[in-house]
Amino acid sequence: MNKIKDIIHDRSFPHVTAVIIILNILVFAIETIVGDSENIYTALKFGAYYHENITQGEWYRFFTCWFVHFGFEHIGSNMLALFAVGPYVERYFGKVKFIIIYLASGICGTIAVIIHEAAIHEYAVSAGASGCIFGLFGILLIFAISRDMRYEFPLPRVLVGMVLMFVPSFTETGIGVDAHIGGFVGGTIAGFIFYLLQCRKNYYRR
């Protein structure tokens, strides 16, 4: 129980989470000022992912697409979700591991998009931080099995939350379910590796 008490009473500012949110909002603000944030051509100018651009060597889109959003609802829902879960993950794992988990989630989300598009031979402009954020939500599963976190994050409640989180991905059009699944898997695996390493470290300290 000590870990969850430490996190709940931890008043340290989640700097990494805040920086990511600020960067996303800044990019969106510039998108909106320069053009229409819901326009795919504006999104492409700011680094959205598109298969044809990647094949032309614009690999930076592999990462920049995480900071581009389509409209206020898109940026609002993503940043609200990041604000809700980001501080817990950052305080539990620390800043460096949080960054690694966030990167792993985003990378796996983009890879999932590439694989899915190659399989169905259909290509679309993709953007948003949701792949990264779904990876952070995957950490809740680790909290649910952790001895010091499971009382605050009971497994049944976490599983219900996961189902509700994925429902819009499968029921609403225009949502990149491939990026969500890829990000979720990548973040969960990265977090679980860190969790096992921490458990091993604690074991040898006894």
Image: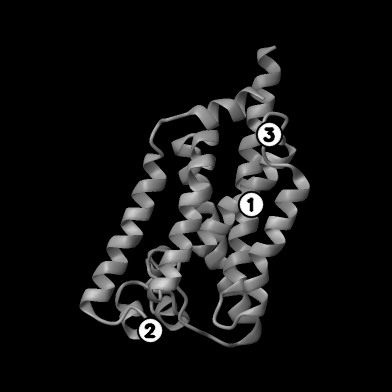
Rendered view: 99 above or below 40: above
* Type of the residue with mark 1: Gly
Quadrant location of residue 92? top right
Residue 22 or 55: which is nearer the viewer?
22
Residue 181 or 146: which is nearer the viewer?
146
List x then y, in percent, for residue 12.
40, 31
Q: How many marks?
A: 3
Rendered view: 63 above or below 174: above
* Type of the residue with mark 2: Ile
- For disc 1, the marked residue is 138
Disc 3 vs disc 1: which is toward the camera? Answer: 1
Whether residues under marks 3 and 2 lie with C-beta atoms below 8 angstroms apart, the answer is: no
- For disc 3, the marked residue is 196
Q: Residues within 10 Å of mark 3 (few under 14, many from 20)?
A: few
- For disc 2, the marked residue is 40
Quadrant location of residue 145? top right
Whether residues under marks 3 and 1 lie with C-beta atoms below 8 angstroms apart, the answer is: no
Residue 170 falls left or right of residue 23: right
The secondary structure type at the circle numbered 3 is helix
Real-space Cα separation, disc 3 to disc 2, in angstroms: 42 Å
Real-space Cα separation, disc 3 to disc 1, in angstroms: 15 Å
